[in-house]
Image (tube, coloured by chain):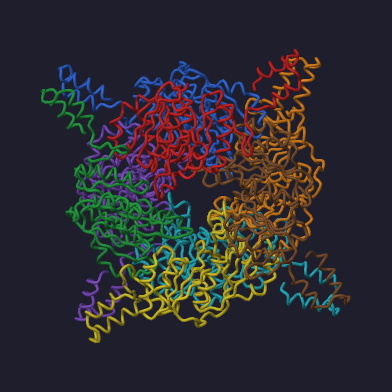
Chain colours: A blue, B red, C purple, D green, E cyan, F yellow, G orange, H brown
Amino acid sequence: MNTENLRELLESVCSGQTDIESATDRLATLPFIQTANARIDTHRAHRQGIPEVIYGGQKTAEQILESAHALIEAGQDVLVTRVDEDKATRVLGRLPSAEYDALAKLVWAGTSEPKILGKGTILVVSAGSADLPVASEAFQVARRFGNKVELLQDVGVAGLHRLLASLDLIRDARVLIVVAGMEGALPSVVGGLVDKPVIAVPTSVGYGASLGGISALLGMLTSCASNVTTVNIDNGFGAAHVATLINRL
Amino acid sequence: MNTENLRELLESVCSGQTDIESATDRLATLPFIQTANARIDTHRAHRQGIPEVIYGGQKTAEQILESAHALIEAGQDVLVTRVDEDKATRVLGRLPSAEYDALAKLVWAGTSEPKILGKGTILVVSAGSADLPVASEAFQVARRFGNKVELLQDVGVAGLHRLLASLDLIRDARVLIVVAGMEGALPSVVGGLVDKPVIAVPTSVGYGASLGGISALLGMLTSCASNVTTVNIDNGFGAAHVATLINRL
Amino acid sequence: MNTENLRELLESVCSGQTDIESATDRLATLPFIQTANARIDTHRAHRQGIPEVIYGGQKTAEQILESAHALIEAGQDVLVTRVDEDKATRVLGRLPSAEYDALAKLVWAGTSEPKILGKGTILVVSAGSADLPVASEAFQVARRFGNKVELLQDVGVAGLHRLLASLDLIRDARVLIVVAGMEGALPSVVGGLVDKPVIAVPTSVGYGASLGGISALLGMLTSCASNVTTVNIDNGFGAAHVATLINRL
Amino acid sequence: MNTENLRELLESVCSGQTDIESATDRLATLPFIQTANARIDTHRAHRQGIPEVIYGGQKTAEQILESAHALIEAGQDVLVTRVDEDKATRVLGRLPSAEYDALAKLVWAGTSEPKILGKGTILVVSAGSADLPVASEAFQVARRFGNKVELLQDVGVAGLHRLLASLDLIRDARVLIVVAGMEGALPSVVGGLVDKPVIAVPTSVGYGASLGGISALLGMLTSCASNVTTVNIDNGFGAAHVATLINRL
Amino acid sequence: MNTENLRELLESVCSGQTDIESATDRLATLPFIQTANARIDTHRAHRQGIPEVIYGGQKTAEQILESAHALIEAGQDVLVTRVDEDKATRVLGRLPSAEYDALAKLVWAGTSEPKILGKGTILVVSAGSADLPVASEAFQVARRFGNKVELLQDVGVAGLHRLLASLDLIRDARVLIVVAGMEGALPSVVGGLVDKPVIAVPTSVGYGASLGGISALLGMLTSCASNVTTVNIDNGFGAAHVATLINRL
Amino acid sequence: MNTENLRELLESVCSGQTDIESATDRLATLPFIQTANARIDTHRAHRQGIPEVIYGGQKTAEQILESAHALIEAGQDVLVTRVDEDKATRVLGRLPSAEYDALAKLVWAGTSEPKILGKGTILVVSAGSADLPVASEAFQVARRFGNKVELLQDVGVAGLHRLLASLDLIRDARVLIVVAGMEGALPSVVGGLVDKPVIAVPTSVGYGASLGGISALLGMLTSCASNVTTVNIDNGFGAAHVATLINRL
Amino acid sequence: MNTENLRELLESVCSGQTDIESATDRLATLPFIQTANARIDTHRAHRQGIPEVIYGGQKTAEQILESAHALIEAGQDVLVTRVDEDKATRVLGRLPSAEYDALAKLVWAGTSEPKILGKGTILVVSAGSADLPVASEAFQVARRFGNKVELLQDVGVAGLHRLLASLDLIRDARVLIVVAGMEGALPSVVGGLVDKPVIAVPTSVGYGASLGGISALLGMLTSCASNVTTVNIDNGFGAAHVATLINRL
Amino acid sequence: MNTENLRELLESVCSGQTDIESATDRLATLPFIQTANARIDTHRAHRQGIPEVIYGGQKTAEQILESAHALIEAGQDVLVTRVDEDKATRVLGRLPSAEYDALAKLVWAGTSEPKILGKGTILVVSAGSADLPVASEAFQVARRFGNKVELLQDVGVAGLHRLLASLDLIRDARVLIVVAGMEGALPSVVGGLVDKPVIAVPTSVGYGASLGGISALLGMLTSCASNVTTVNIDNGFGAAHVATLINRL
């Protein structure tokens, strides 16, 4: 609701095209759907062509379904993140049109093939095969959001030749998402090989001094490659969202 | 040095255009300058039009000057970050053509007005006036790197009307850098107002439970706005570098 | 037992109204009930009209029942917090008059409709639907303690319009409890909109750098809004207790 | 700017009393003063009779003076917190009407005796004499904000008789601010003695495992007294602000 | 093996009372029992009358039994700490003479009534009823080690009158063990009431900012009562061991 | 003030020996001295023959002198801990009878040779020569408190023969204070050699992962020797106080 | 791929022995096997005689089998670490030639008796019997990698005589791996007894302030014995790998 | 003092070659020098040809000199680490034969050119020029301890070509010391390029989330290259000591 819109509304009221009550209502009617337990933001989805996303991590199947049904009624695609297999079974039982990706832990109900809106390729690079669930979340979300996406996996820094063998793929990407656990060094190395923005995703892969991903996170935040920014531990979704916005510029 | 270049070099050797010794040399001659104490990467600067940057934080004036002179001899611009006033005096004493920005703690030796290479505006938003040094580092680096930059300052989340008064400025930016200390909530609020990438910079402004910027950092990493990525505490330079790369896409 | 009471007791002894033995006993008879495993404080409840509360979190069903029966014999209402469904089943099996709120994890045995003793409305604001269990604990405890309570939910800071749509509700409250996980920024924003005390409750909602609620807690402690105080992670009960005391002033 | 105000403005525009341009301006004209480096919020001060407060901790004398002069021109009182002696000398040199409290580290320019607006007494309780600077900040701010304030000092929990000797003073307070470093146990003990809200202020007094006040902070957050809320380490100002708001209810 | 013993052994060898082989053997025969997986120290038990203790926390039932049988064969009493109910069932199945205390999680095989060797009373004070398992471990271990022990429970600092009602009991103890979770303030208060050594045991009781007992631990380490020393979180056994050694002085 | 004393006071009032006013006064007259900034506890000193101790760490020379003069007027010895050389000069300038120990950072004003009240020897063991200031604080405080004290220094665990060479000294002590920085392993080794209480004092000696003494502290808290209890980092005073109480048993 | 190899390849192309296409291929054909989910490094194994190792900790049985089969097809031995019993059953079900060591949690498929390639003995020393699983991982990996290995267990520092009884064994080792939980002091003591490299392995054995092995880790990093280096918590495998490399020197 | 030596001593006593007194003395005469404040271990130096090392970090110039003079009298070389320029001036003032390396912060008094005892080359690799002081400490200590040492500096992972240009140097080393601050990724990359032991030294270079070197330390501990072990932050000395022991094998 910027100054320009406000001026137009005021002129419309003044000219009699809009009466005062309905103008007040319109100002108050904000773009969300009120369900019993949630205020779902429908605004961004309409404007952007990015499906509405429900964070499923600490919600019950019932909370997820309540939000999903409201979105479907509003004619929108639905993407739910962090849905484990048990919860997915319960959700799909009452939302049969939906599909579930068990590796990425995503539930999707909507258009099966998204329209490509990104201008280049997003490359998802993953350090080890244990990082694959997070890399898959990033990959699938970026794909659902309308991007051409490539995946380069198991190219940790202790075996540089595996990474350098795919140098062309790395240099062709417009945006890079680099996923790594343990010491989280891969974004620094990849960042040094490209002149593109690198979004680093630390994972909780590791043990002991990995501290559940904190070490990888700290490593990425203190990267000596200055084209690296970082998101939360295991947050493949967030990385894909930002990469999508960048890829549409 | 990708497969294509390698093939060309091999063909050139095979056809006699290049002899074996010089091919080997060429493969070994890597794009850096070896000084007494440093291997300065001149490669990226030539290719990108981004001046070479020296992190001055834990270097002596002598180390800074050694690198700066090597770059100047190579015909490059020089930007040094994190130079306090004492060190700046010693550096400028032996590098009289350089200028010093005391607020942003930057030393610059090179073209005074950079060519604009970014496609849109980078907006630097700062939460409080104590965050200004970091915001200035981001602002000046982005400017030196060839971007149109705007600064919106002192718009912390506890006085929303100050922020909302500049909504047009916020929505016109192509990339946003949001700088905040204490609880670090500003990127979440700004992130919710735009559909552009937001680079969050936590600052060490605050006391007690601020933990030297850790609380702001954690707040930004766990932001409920999924278009936010984060850099290290007080890292205005890194934010400006990534914003520049994005703004050139 | 202040100086005034002591003086009266001494005078009463001296005048012969009270004999020495019974005065000594009275001084020693302190206002608690000694059960096998607990010394339950009955003093505060009598004086305040606030039902006695049992923290059920790390107690067995047996320990809860022992304390509950002692209170009921003393003619008091009983409120037990942090009772999961299994424990609740065992407690209600032997305390059939009690009711259980599964969302708020509260067991209640007592008057069904509390007398309103608070002077205004306590507003509980919750950032996301995953924060609802903690918000419900705060809401139900405040209600049981004799307050008019309102709940405003799912109004996180990344969608400001959802919050601003309820500005009247926010400004009408006498005391506010603001519940948020992840970056915990909501109390700062709400605190900037009102001139009333805001009690911030961090929740353990989030993952990775949320550190089980520590990030939200740090964010609230370092809030740039100076009308915010904070309680422990997930401590909806404590927030409701303090809000009740303030609302009775 | 609530719905009611908006409706009135719209009616006024519609009836011709206000033209469209000025209505737009009025909506855009937000209640802050724009200086070179800050947007100072003048709104709250006008409405509340609480003087505008400048956090001086990480600002230069120049930044403090810029804000102070803007406020004085707007006819407001000025309170600056966390001003060390050197900075105070420079500020008072250019603001001769101001006074400086070296123990509380406060600069004040305004009415010397504030009008009492609080309904009861705020009691500031301090654990040890090393906590006095923080307790003084709380005391002086509460006094400047128009409260009757009492100070009870050096009553740490390892000498209970010192505390219990002042039980009447403790029980007569309407709001309590309890300041303690080291293990931070005093708010729990005081909280158990009263039925009033207790605002706990951890201090950085201590060494080793005190962790700069973190241990006291954690102790207060996990207090077994449920009428305790907590503010940031050494934040006497914040405690006084909240206590003032509560005392005016 | 001090200098004096060595001299005697040498003299005995020299005089022919002891031959060289057996002297070498005696020097090499150290006072432990070698089992398949452990070197059990039998030395201390013989000398002190303190039964040998097996830490059962991260051992299997098989490892516990192996050590227990070795001790029984050597004619010693056996005490196993941190044995949960499942493991206890398996241990008692093959050690029928043993008894199990489920609250204290102790297995005991030996003399049922220990000889009193301590000179005074050890008092175990516990803050809340959730701290009882740790307090019981301390109580039972101290009892098994031959002390007169008393238990004072549920006397947290937020209800001082419950503690002060037992002041005589507190002042009669020769050594005190004070067990508390959450903010861990009880040792400071008790420490201020007595002139005896106070051994503080933090417990993992609490949630959120309790950090699994770290907050209580930090509170105890930074206690303003200087007669307090601290042991590890939930280490009732260690407290009882030290208290026993002190009580025998 | 136990039940017995109370009964006597009541009888005395009842019999007319004591009038009501003076009985009330006596109950209210608690054993401390009220100075401008402190309530000094004179009670314990009188009863115990332990000189009153002032923690000088975060106090000004003025605060120290105020307390010291009050104590001297009350006829007591004065011990001030953590006094650096500058502060000591200012204190001794106005308290000429006092002496200063620069290594232990102690100021003492009182009887030069304390009466021996401890029953045995307290042995202070120190790991490295950098730990000497803390070991000296423990040594001198224990001496001032009336104990026979011995010091065994520079016997870190990486050179066991240095420690074992003094085994007789170690085994002759009645109470042991073991001071160590870095990994803090010495108390575990010493604890295994004796059957006496060992008080472990971690020091802030070390760098990097020493974390200012936290690593030594954690090592001592998790010691596999169960006769070890721990005090705060660098808290030589606290260790000496507890050792004194134990040595008088 | 060093300069020498490159020169030879170029000469071979130039002389016509190798054509350009195959040279390019050879440069691109890097020494790993690409499976569906992994790029397995076969290079090192061939060159070194060290079997390829799969970290099984956060992989599914299916991921483990995919890698294992690829290695077996390439004619290599397979070692999988951190395989719990359930996963082992599933792996061995489809890899019947493999053996499983339940204590060390290792799966092995390959030559049953490795050729001894190490020049001396690797000694694995373990502090307590609860550390045995980690010590066994180190022991078995070192054995599989072709070393003579000895195990000395249950020799914690609180019973020095148990350790000193095996001094000859300790002094005969060429490389030492020292495994300890809790305070992690054993490497310091062992390090002081030998002039050989000591690799310290902290374990997660302990509770409370052990912080899951962090305390042991910190203790080892800050060891006063300067011949100690450290690996991650519970990383018996890594210690054995480094010890093997050293033992082959 | 192993069993064999003991037997020989006993036989010698028995045969009359050694009398009892002198045998006892010999057993008690342990190989250290007792100065006023230290027990200096002279044993290792004699046996190994490694000069005795004094950690100068938290010692005064006086403490350093006391130890140095004792060593010189015993005919040994002296190496003092962590001596800043002020302290060095004071030490060299009274030890004129010593030399000072200001970059490595080392004082040396002894043979100027050490005899080479190591079998191969130790390579010190440093990530950035700010890491040079720590790398120099490692380099100079390794040199003083009798090794051939090479230094490869400024080869951080974000510019891989700088590192790969020196691949031959890297592969020729027998032992590698890799020094890095910030994210500490260099040891992982170097570790993947060699089959030799890599000793990782984290440095405190960096800011914000570098946490004074903790992030680099964590990154090294969780390295995906399993031939990496780690020492304390900035501990160039320790790395050189271990590398020396390995290089002599």
The quarter holding residue D142 reads bottom left
Residue F186 seen in the figure: yes
Is residue C243 left or right of E95 when viewed as pictured?
Answer: left
- Total numbered circles: 0
Comparing H50 with B35, the one in front is B35
Comparing A180 with B154, the one in front is B154
Comparing A92 with H62, the one in front is H62
Q: Quadrant of the N terminus of chain D?
A: top left
Q: Position of residue A168 (x, y in %)?
A: 61, 21
Residue E73 seen in the figure: no
At 81% across and 72% down in the image, what residue appears? E23
Q: Position of residue C187 (x, y in %)?
A: 33, 42
Q: Is residue E123 above or below residue G88?
A: below
Q: Please, which residue is most extreme toward the top here?
A: B15
Q: Position of residue D192 (x, y in %)?
A: 32, 61
Q: Position of residue F113 (x, y in %)?
A: 50, 82
The quarter holding residue B12 reads top right
